[in-house]
Image (spheres, rainbow, N blue to C red):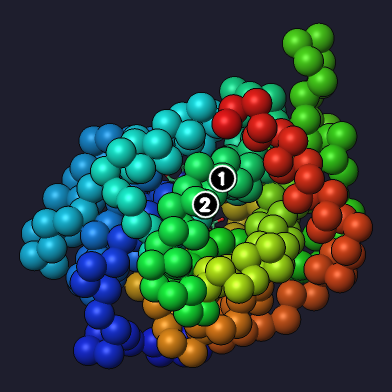
Amino acid sequence: MPKVREFNPHGTIDLSGKVVLITGGSAGIGKVNVRQFAELGAKVYVVARNKEKTQAVVDEVRFKTGNKNVFFVYGELDKLESVKAAGKAFLEKENRLHILVCNAGTGSRTKVWTSDGFEVLFGQNYLAHVMLLRILLDCLKETANSLNNVQGCVRIVNVSSRASDFPGAPSKIDFDYLVKKGDSDSRQLPDDRKTIVIPDYSVSKLCQVLQTIKLSEVLKGTGISAYSLHPGMVQTGGYDKIYSQGGIKALIYRALQFQMINEEDGSLTTLYCAVSNEAANDSGLFYENCAAAVNNNKAVKDRAQIEKLWTKSFEWTESFI
Ligand SMILES: NC(=O)c1ccc[n+]([C@@H]2O[C@H](COP(=O)([O-])OP(=O)(O)OC[C@H]3O[C@@H](n4cnc5c(N)ncnc54)[C@H](OP(=O)(O)O)[C@@H]3O)[C@@H](O)[C@H]2O)c1
C-alpha cells in the first residue's frame, strides 16, 4: 500500500460561515470530502445527477456530523444547460462561495458525445466544470473581495489525475477531435479510443491542469487560489465499470488493486488544497499526496496551447451562458 501523507485539519481549521460547492459528491472521493467539509462546519452544496443517491449521502452526512447545512443541487455534467442551471440554483440561495471543488469525473464511457456534441470525457470531466466556473466566478470574486482579497481566502480545486502526465498521455490536444461537427457528423471513436482510458481520459485531466495554470494567472491579485491534483489511485466505484468489462484491462486494474489507497486517504489531497494554510499562496500548482508535485507533461510549458485551450473553452461554452 502506498504511503499517504497525513493531513488532519480538525481542531485547527474552522469552516463555520464558509460555503463549499462540490461536484460528484454522491460517491467515491467526493462523498468523503462532503463529510469532511461538513465536519469542519461549512455549508456544503453537492452538485450531482442522481437525486435519490445523493440525498441519501446528504442525510447520512447531516446525521453523522450534526451539520444540517448540507444540500443537494441537481446537475448533470453531460449537459451544459444542466450545469448552468445548477450554478444558477446555487446563486439563488447564496451570494458567497469560498471553496469550489470540481471533482466529478469518469474514465469510462458508453457513448461518443455529450448531449452538446463534445467528446464525452472531455465534455463531462473538463468543459462542464468550465461552464460551472463561468457561472460562479463573479460570486467567487465577490467573496474574495469581502475578505480583502487575501491570497487563498477563496479556492478552486480541480480534481485531475496522474493520467494527465503518465507515459502515453498526449501533450498535444487535438481540438478538432473534441467537437462534433454538426448533425451530419456521424464519426465514431476509433476502436482504440472506444474502451481504453488513454488518451481521452488523459486529455480531459490534462485540460484541468492547464486551466488551473491559466486561472492562477488571470486571478492574480483577486485572492482566489486554484489547484489541480492527483488524489492517488483510490479504490472507488469508478473502477467497477472497468472490472465488469473483463479482459486484459480488467486484469491489469485488478493487479493494481494492492497499490490503491482507500477513499478516506484518497480524499486528503483535495481537502489539503481546499483548506490548508500551507497551500494558500501556491496558486496554479499540481498536488499529490498533500504536497505540491511536478506534472511531467510538457504541455504545462506550452504557452500557445494553454492560451488556445482557454480561448476554445470560452468559445465552446459561450452559447450556453
Ligand atoms: N479513483 C481514482 O483512482 C482516481 C485517480 C485519479 C483521479 N481521480 C478523479 O477523482 C474524481 C473522483 O473520482 P472517484 O474515483 O471518486 O469516482 P467515482 O467513485 O466514480 O465518483 C465519481 C463521481 O462523479 C459523478 N459523475 C460522473 N459523471 C457525472 C455526470 N455526467 N454528471 C454528474 N456527476 C457525474 C458521479 O456521480 P454518480 O454517483 O451519479 O455516478 C460520482 O459522484 C474524478 O474526477 C476522477 O477522474 C480518481
Q: Measured from the top left, where is residue 226 in percent x and y?
A: 58, 68
Q: Is residue 216 left or right of residue 136?
A: right
Label 1 neighbour load within 10 Å: few <14, some 14-19, many 20+: some
Q: Nearer the viewer, residue 239 or 125?
A: 125
Residue at 88%, 63% (x, y): give it. 303
Write down the residue under mark 1: 134
Q: Is residue 166 above or below residue 83?
A: below
Q: Measured from the top left, where is residue 318 in percent x and y?
A: 66, 32
Q: Are marks 1 and 2 in contact (CB under 8 Å)?
A: yes
Q: Is residue 94 left or right of residue 187?
A: left
Q: Measured from the top left, where is residue 308 in percent x and y?
A: 84, 49
Query: Could you give the CA–CA distance between mark 1 and mark 2, rounded to whole angstroms?
Result: 5 Å
Q: Measured from the top left, where is residue 73 in percent x and y?
A: 31, 40
Residue at 70%, 41% (x, y): give it. 314
Q: Is residue 161 above or below residue 273?
A: above
Residue 262 seen from this side = no
Specify the quadrant of the image occupied by residue 208: bottom right
Q: Nearer the viewer, residue 173 or 140?
A: 140
Specify the quadrant of the image occupied by residue 89: top left
Residue at 51%, 27% (x, y): give it. 81
Q: Amino acid at mark 1?
A: Arg
- The quadrant of the image that shows the C terminus is top right
Q: Is residue 296 left or right of residue 70?
A: right
Q: Amino acid at mark 2?
A: Leu
Q: Nearer the viewer, residue 166 or 307?
A: 307
> What's the mark number on residue 137?
2
* Element under disc 2: helix
